[in-house]
Amino acid sequence: MNKSNPGSGKSVALSSAVFLLGPIFAVLVATVYKLQAVAILGGGPSGVADPQKLSANISAILYITAIGLLLSIIGLVFLCITLFRYRYRDAWFFWFLVSYGFIVLAFFPIGKVFGICILIYCICSRREFFRSEVK
């Protein structure tokens, strides 16, 4: 952890956690929009799907996906800054990384790679996160 300003590592870690959880919520919102698109494809009372409603729905899904991807990239940058520049280590951050690693494993194929890397890092450096500070 940065000795000159110990609070900055924690603030970057919290920012990282928020940005990394953002894409998960984006996936949930995109799923709702996808379900609405399926309902639009089913057609209304006339049995014919409205192409304008469908294209607006698909456009919203693409915007949400792009925002989720942007949040993920920002979160990963903050995560790297937290772990490697500030060397911030705390028990809550360890458990967040483990939980996030397991959640990301569900997103194939890139999520598998990131999830496995995060979990391997946590396993290899778990003692650093739980070290008791001696003063």
Image (spheres, rainbow, N blue to C red):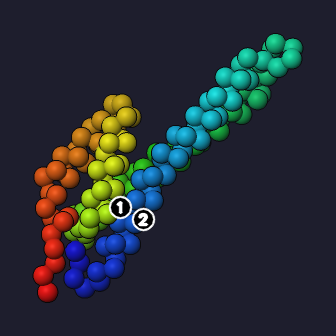
Residue 82 position within the rendered picture, expressed as x and y whole percent measured from the top left? 29, 65
Q: Amino acid at mark 2?
A: Ser
Q: Residue at x 32, y 42 (%)?
A: 102
Residue 21 position within the rendered picture, expressed as x and y whole percent measured from the top left? 45, 52
Is 77 situated left or right of 58 in this image? left
Q: Residue at x 35, y 66 (%)?
A: 13
Does residue 80 appear in the picture of this structure?
no
Q: Look at the numbered discs 2 and 1 and tell me whether their residues touch, using CB distance below 8 Å.
A: yes
Question: Marks 2 and 1, how far apart in space?
Answer: 7 Å
Residue 62 in the image: above or below residue 39: below
Q: Quadrant of residue 129?
A: bottom left
Label 2 CA crowd tier, 10 Å (few <14, some 14–19, many 20+): some
Picture quarter with the N terminus: bottom left
Q: Quadrant of residue 131?
A: bottom left
Which SS class for mark 2?
Answer: helix
Residue 46 in the image: above or below residue 32: above
Residue 28 position within the rendered picture, expressed as x and y whole percent measured from the top left? 55, 40
Q: Nearer the viewer, residue 71 or 11?
A: 11
Q: Earlier in the sequence, mark 2 or mark 1?
A: 2
Residue 18 in the image: above or below residue 86: above
Residue 90 in the image: above or below residue 109: below
Q: Amino acid at mark 1?
A: Phe
Q: Residue at x 13, y 52 (%)?
A: 124
Q: Which residue is mark 1?
A: 78
Q: Which residue is mark 2?
A: 15
Is 102 situated left or right of 48 in this image? left
Label 1 CA crowd tier, 10 Å (few <14, some 14–19, many 20+): many
Q: Nearer the viewer, mark 2 or mark 1?
A: 2
Does residue 130 appear in the picture of this structure?
yes
Picture quarter with the C terminus: bottom left
Q: Nearer the viewer, residue 89 or 109?
A: 89
Which SS class for mark 1?
Answer: helix
